[in-house]
Image (cartoon, coloured by chain):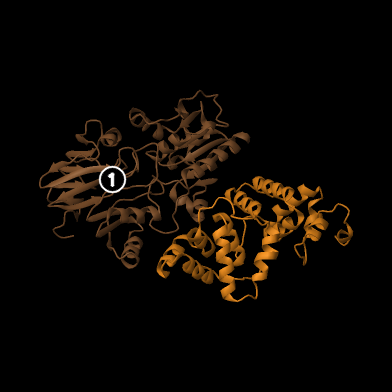
Chain colours: A brown, B orange
Amino acid sequence: MVRDVVTLTPKGLYCPAGDFYIDPWKPVERALITHAHADHARPGSSHYHAAKSGVGLLKKRLGQDTAIQAHAYGTRVPLGDAVASFHPAGHVLGSAQVRIEVDGEVWVISGDYKCDEDPSCETFEPVPCDVFVTEATFALPIYRWDPIEQVMRELMRWWQANAEAGRASVVFCYALGKAQRLLAEIARHRQAADRVIYLHGAVDALMPAYREAGIALPETATVLDQPKDKSFAGELVIAPPSAFGSPWMQRLGDCGTAFASGWMRVRGHRRRRGFDEGFVLSDHADWPGLLQTIEATGAKKVYATHGYSDTLARYLKESKNIDAEPLATLFEGEGDDT
Amino acid sequence: MQRFSRLYADLDRTTKTNAKVQAMVDYFRDVPPEDAAWAVFFLTGQRLKRLISGRLLREWALNATGYPDWLVTDAHAAVGDSAETVSLLVDQGLVEPAGAARSLSAWMEDGILPLRGQSADIQERTVTAWWNHLPRAEIFLLNKLLTGAFRVGVSKLLVVRALATVSDLPRPAISHRLMGQWQPTAAWYEKLLDPKSADDDRSRP
């Protein structure tokens, strides 16, 4: 990537023409941030740019005093000799792909993205480009997501079965994004009407940003704020994976546990984690989603990063006749423990 | 096979022995004796001789999907099991079987066992057609049965407990009747649970 629109440097992906970084992993002068997950939004840079609807979450992560310039999706932002813009990535609230144009050549850095509709964030839009830097977290043909309605039906049935057995139901998932997507989906179900959903503190802390953005969510309350004699039998609780097996769970009494993640598609992942149930629910594109997106961008060159980047690059090259290569970054995708 | 697939999922998702026994009790009460007989056969750890190798199954998946060889190898490396890899690759996203559902015994006797001795070509065409009509969980089970690798996480003792609950017979009687050679038929299963069929118990010490 010599003299390219974007190059890979020790601090991260860098655009020399605009003198800015995209999701740098070290402090820099000017950083464009795709979304608020910790492996993409790191503190310490002097100036940040991000999509407008993601600023609330970013400030929660980077500090309320952080200087962040907010941009509406699609707005052209001149930076040096480059023009940058943010476009919906469908990953979490305010997540964006970064489009960079220099001398008529267009590069798009996808950040993390998913193609499925999600009531808790803006829907992904493919952006035509010459060069596409795509994530590859689930770039194997075994990863294909069932429709969300089906996953939610399974989850609701599981909740009901636990309730009938006098147990609480605890779903473990990413505190940022996945938890709110789950809540927004739950809000669509009649079974959950007028129900309070209980949250771990780490999930609760991110709720104001979603509520302020006007996302329709059910009523929520934190587990630890409940009176000592409150029974959680029959209730649904959402918590980050790090809370699994922690003393925090003792407060819930008898409970069924589930993990919501794309990794749950594989039985071995499900069993190793020790949860009772696994729901296949990911905020990343599945194999068909990745391929459709790459095709829709019309990119002549594709760089694949994190996850199964080697597999995706080889498949694109050998089976789709697209110039592609893996790119080694420090992004983690859907890690097992975040 | 849908009901057996649900039993498998119930057994797979819990480590609690009481829940496993209850899942088996519910199953045995739900299904006709010819299906229960086959379920006892598999739950007690008996296995069919391998019909199809994992490698052959992957080769058929390759032909069915058109994916390159190396990609199926990568997928297999990520999953670690041929039957599961193939079920994930050929999955059409069905929630219910397309067409008429077949019971476990019908699958065994009219589907799987007659494959033995067929040419590889007919075996491939038959199995590939099954894949197109089944939901993923059932493709997985079918593949496991075909490769003779079907295992389920229950001990024989738990199966005996479940059968004793269903039949109201003492556990040693069930345990004794399960010994030796037997064929998984409806008649055998009915005898297994028959309170009056004490003839084979006489020899019990």
Can you tell which quarter of the image residue A65 is in? top left
Q: Is residue B175 left or right of residue B76?
A: right
Amino acid on which disc 1 is placed = His
Q: Quadrant of the C terminus of chain A?
A: top left
Residue visible at 46% across and 28% down in the picture = A224
Residue visible at 62% across and 53% down in the picture = B5
Crowding around mark 1 (Cα neighbors within 10 Å: few <14, some 14 to 19, many 20+) is many
- Image coordinates of residue B1 in percent, x first then y, are 65, 56
Q: Is residue A156 left or right of residue A321?
A: right
Front residue of this view, candidates A5 and A23: A5
Total marks placed: 1
- Image coordinates of residue A204 in percent, x first then y, are 40, 31
Front residue of this view, candidates A284 and B45: A284
* Residue labelled with disc 1: A40
Considering only vertical position in the picture, is A158 above or below A11? above
Residue A23 appears in the rendering: no
Residue B3 appears in the rendering: yes
- Image coordinates of residue B72 in percent, x first then y, are 44, 66
- Image coordinates of residue A99 in percent, x first then y, are 22, 47
Looking at the rendered structure, the secondary structure element under dot 1 is loop
Of all residues, the one furthest to the front in this rendering is: B99
Front residue of this view, candidates A199 and A313: A313
Q: Is residue B97 left or right of residue B158?
A: left
> In the rendered structure, the residue with mark 1 lies on which chain?
A
Q: Quadrant of the N terminus of chain A?
A: bottom left
